[in-house]
Amino acid sequence: MPHTPPTNLWLDRIAPRACFAWRGRWQTGTVEPWRLLYDHELVLFQQGECRVTIADSPPAEAWPLRRDEQGRPLWRAVSGRDADALARRPTPGTAYTCVAGSFLIIPPETAHVTLVTRGPVVRSCIHFDWLADDLPASPLCTVPPERPDPALVRRAPPWIPPGLVHGPVRLRRAVDDLADAFFRRWNTRRVDERLAGRGTLLELLVRLLADADEARVPTTTDLAHAVKIRLDQNLADSHALPDLLADLDRSYEHLCRVFAACYGLPPLRYLTAARLERAKELLSQPGAGIASVAQTVGYSDPAYFARLFRSHVGKSPSAYAKQTTQSE
């Protein structure tokens, strides 16, 4: 089924790990027989066109399979009239036309068959787990009449949306660059590079699956940051706090709620803490005057500044200045 939002909540929880990866070129008429995976497979289609047919179970006439001396599957290629007939033959199930600039994520135990309808096809394939859990080792796939051993299937966590994902690549250049970076790391066969490749795989999946509109940072976070910048840049301004924030085009009460939700404290407390830290720095310099320091950090009344300083620091500004200058 096509991928549908929402995505961002569950994407924030994934920690993918690649199990196996390869990329290559396939000519028109190449057939990968009916098979069922043990894990998830991400397929990026970068050139040509394939038809991938998904069914609940493979038909009785599953295409024959050859194996090499190590028992690994060899996909059967056909050509000429056989290939032309095969391309037109109806196959039970849901067919996905996979063109350059599209992708598939095929879940485990999903019966599927692939035919290259317009080659050459260039694909990048990554078998992966959504989480780097301690799962048992498993082969990549089985072919009819065998089915995957249930004890070895690497299923997704329950909060991952079920089913096959098929869609266009939104940011194709960025995705192709990420795929190239992943395969460079994978092909080194170095442990540290493959560990670093997990971050690349995570970004690759996020670029493919995150909804463009949902992916925007919430405006409340931007607004809270705007408040912080305004406070940081106006420590010396003695105007009341609502006046400092007036041109942010929101009510003072709303700005306080947004800031507290993001930073964990009200803006006035943040501003007071920042001003007092600046005052402590100024008081540690020889010859600093209390009235001058108060003015520099936004307090026009030195007496009020002294009371505020004592209540937060535990000593008067003059005592703090004497202590710090003597200790140097």
Image (tube, helix red, strand yellow):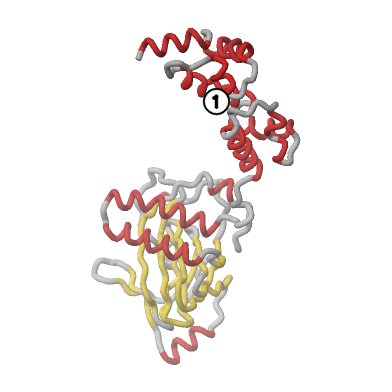
Taking the image as shown, residue 201 lies to the left or right of residue 309, namely left
Q: Identity of the amino acid at label 1?
A: Ala
Residue 313 image offset from top left, x and y in percent: 52, 12
Residue 150 in view of the camera: no
Image position of 228 with respect to 32: above or below: above
Q: Quadrant of the C terminus?
A: top left
What is the quadrant of residue 81 in the picture?
bottom left
Q: Nearer the viewer, residue 209 or 230?
A: 230
At mark 1, the secondary structure is helix
Q: Which residue is mark 1?
A: 274
Residue 311 image offset from top left, x and y in percent: 58, 10
Image position of 91 with respect to 311: above or below: below
Identified at 37% across, 68% down, the residue is 23
Q: Residues within 10 Å of mark 1 (few under 14, many from 20)?
A: some
What is the quadrant of residue 264 in the picture?
top right
Q: Quadrant of the N terminus?
A: bottom right
User: Residue reaching furthest bottom?
Assistant: 81
Identified at 33% across, 69% down, the residue is 73
What is the quadrant of residue 26 in the picture?
bottom left
Taking the image as shown, residue 176 lies to the left or right of residue 301, namely left
Identified at 71% across, 40% down, the residue is 247
Residue 324 in view of the camera: yes
Q: Nearer the viewer, residue 50 or 298?
A: 298
Image position of 103 with respect to 227: above or below: below
